[in-house]
Image (cartoon, helix red, strand yellow):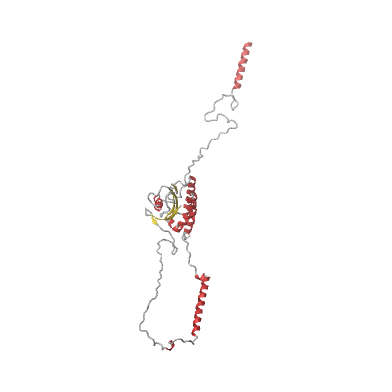
Amino acid sequence: MKRTKLLSLLLLFSLLVSLAALPVRADGAPGVATAPAAGEDAGTDAPGEETETPDAETDAPSGNEALPSAPSGVNRPELSRVVDNADLLTGEEEADLAERIASLISELGFDIVILTNGNGYGGKDVVAFADDYYDEHGYGVGSDNSGILFLVDLAERDLYFSTCGKAITVFTDYGINQLYNAVVSYFSNGDYASGFRRFLRELPDYASAYEMGEPIDIPYHEPKDPKKNPVTYIVIAAIAFVISLISMNRVKKTMNTAKISLTADDCLVNSSLAFRNKADRFLHSHTSRVYHSSSSSSGRSGSGGGSSTHFSSGGVSHGGGGGKF
């Protein structure tokens, strides 16, 4: 009997130990531990360790950003306005120039193209090459394809500006020469990016002068009004004094009637001397020539300026000019 009670107590003690080892649920009742479900955290992060999940929407830097597109007002907005075929510029310099050009096109109202070349002109000269490149690629603004193309050729050392449409009048022959003088030193020193930036900085001055009705051209000086020149009065006074002095001297001479005669001419009767033969002989002659200009260049009357034009191989009228560097 005692042995049976002892076994019962041992079984009861074992049952209590087993129940104490079971995990307790949230409601306080004992339960069975389960593994974490899929998609749930298996446990708490260890102290000092943080896990960051990258934002899926963050763009990774590409390192190859596209050049800014030209404004919608140009005829071919999808074309690049910086064409560096001679590889004179870095990618950052191209992007900077393209951004400046896009802003200027909207401001000035004509197209702007920068072109570098180093592979020759394909049998053409620099003028035909620049004009045809502009025409064949469809650059320009409006129906007259207004714009300016700046060509730099590394092989021939040429700087050339080709103009079309309204830009022909904006950039006169004299103005293009001034533009060339402003940038040539940069290219001679190999500072191509700075040369192109200087070119772009010059353009607003030309456009502003054109809008005011006075394109940058050969300086024209109107004749000064002689009435406003004090020297004129001095000269007039001097001439009047000399004339009055001569006149008074003649009057003085007529008042002296007593004369000493050394010949017998005074004794002759008037009209008693007659000449049998008379003839006119010309001792010298004088010829005056006046030069009349026949220049057909457009520009101010009497200024000698304006813009000379020519036709591209496609029959489009162009202006332009440039030089070596």
Q: Quadrant of residue 16?
A: top right
Residue 10 position within the rendered picture, expressed as x and y whole percent measured from the top left: 62, 15
Kindly identify the residue that appears in the image at 43 percent across and 57 percent down. 168
Residue found at the far front of this picture? 262
Quadrant in which the N terminus appears: top right
Residue 76 position within the rendered picture, expressed as x and y whole percent measured from the top left: 42, 49
Q: Quadrant of residue 46?
A: top right
Front-lying residue, 96 or 192 = 192
Residue 73 position within the rendered picture, expressed as x and y whole percent measured from the top left: 44, 51
Residue 29 appears left or right of 251: right
Front-lying residue, 151 or 36 = 151
The answer to whether one can see residue 151 in this image is: no
Instruction: Using the image, determine if residue 253 lies above or below residue 90.
Output: below
Residue found at the far right of this picture? 2
User: How many discs mark residues in the rendered view?
Assistant: 0
Residue found at the far left of this picture? 277
